[in-house]
């Protein structure tokens, strides 16, 4: 099933994908955690690299060689804090306020220094502004990819869709698996996700598990902004570096409207 609507368990954990479980074809372990003030999470994986993304709240981050206080009040107007650690390295997250974090990990035999990406370290592009009567304009944020972390097997970024707009447009695909974790600015908000020949309803907290090779654009309903965290696992010997646009829609790239 390429689209799921998971709930938090009694410990405040929402599992999206598991390398040895649900959506194993994504080749990543991904989960979202809620942390109450004063609670801590100790993380260390002997075989997997780890990305910790602050969704909302205020936390103290500690890792081998550093520490920082990170805060984020809103997904739609503030850029992320992201901590990236290699296999065998420790990381600790302590909540100062009610907080929510996303954890992404996968196997990687390489060692590399831990790195904290602050909001100003993200690369942000307003995509498709002035095209197609601005029906696909959105903010694309990239934190980690092959250009700035070729030692990593992971890609992570965010997209903020403005109300009633498309994202992932023009329709595209790539051989690497990808996960979109969706949030909507109001609980009743919704959109539609197109994966191959299937269509799914986007709701707050849902996610898409997109197998390699399937096209995957989406659209939001008027009046509601949609956020999604996009995550890719490089294939061995075939890292993700760009999208492959569908031939039948490439005429849009040169359209004058």
Image (cartoon, helix red, strand yellow):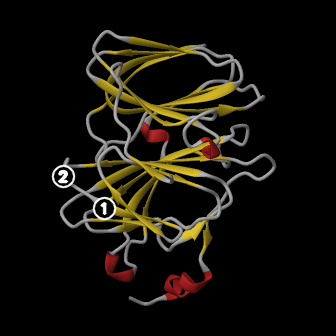
Q: Residue at x 69, y 38 (%)?
A: 152
182 left or right of 44?
left
Q: Residue at x 64, y 61 (%)?
A: 242
* Numbered tag placed on residue 191 in the rendering: 1
Query: Around disc 1, counting alpha carbons within 10 Å, would you say few (fewer than 14), some (14 to 19), or many (20 or more)?
Result: many
Q: Residue at x 69, y 40 (%)?
A: 153
Let me know if residue 143 appears in the view: no
49 left or right of 55?
right
Query: Around disc 2, counting alpha carbons within 10 Å, would you say few (fewer than 14), some (14 to 19), or many (20 or more)?
Result: few
Q: Position of residue 85 (x, y in %)?
A: 61, 25
User: Residue 233 falls in which quadrant of the image?
Assistant: top right
Q: Are circles 1 and 2 on residues that touch, CB within 8 Å?
A: no
Q: Secondary structure at mark 2?
A: loop
Residue 173 vertical placement versus 106 (above, below)? below
Decide which of 217, 19 is in the foreground and name it: 19
Q: Residue at x 61, y 45 (%)?
A: 26
Q: Which residue is mark 2?
A: 188
Q: Position of residue 109 (x, y in %)?
A: 78, 28
């Amino acid at each position: 099933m390429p689209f799921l609507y998971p709930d938090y368990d009694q410990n405040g954990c929402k599992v999206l994908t598991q390398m040895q479980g649900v959506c194993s074809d994504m080749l990543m372990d991904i989960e979202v955690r809620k942390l109450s003030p004063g609670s801590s999470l100790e993380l260390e994986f002997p075989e997997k690299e780890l990305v910790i993304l602050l969704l909302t709240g205020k936390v103290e981050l500690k890792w081998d060689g550093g520490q920082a206080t990170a805060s984020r009040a809103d997904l739609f107007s503030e850029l992320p804090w992201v901590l990236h650690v290699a296999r065998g390295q420790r990381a600790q997250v302590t909540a100062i306020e009610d907080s929510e974090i996303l954890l992404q990990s996968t196997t990687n035999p390489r060692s590399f220094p831990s790195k904290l990406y602050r909001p100003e370290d993200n690369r942000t592009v307003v995509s498709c502004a002035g095209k197609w009567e601005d029906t696909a304009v959105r903010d694309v944020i990239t934190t980690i990819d092959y250009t700035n972390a070729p030692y990593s097997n992971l890609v992570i970024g965010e997209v903020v869709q403005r109300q009633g707009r498309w994202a992932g447009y023009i329709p595209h695909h790539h051989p690497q698996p990808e996960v979109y974790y969706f949030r909507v600015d109001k609980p009743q908000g919704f959109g539609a996700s197109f994966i191959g020949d299937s269509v799914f309803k986007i709701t707050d907290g849902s996610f898409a598990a997109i197998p390699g090779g399937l096209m995957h654009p989406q659209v939001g309903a008027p009046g509601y902004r949609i956020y999604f965290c996009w995550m890719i696992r490089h294939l061995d010997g075939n890292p993700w570096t760009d999208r492959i646009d569908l031939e039948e829609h490439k005429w849009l790239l040169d359209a004058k409207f």
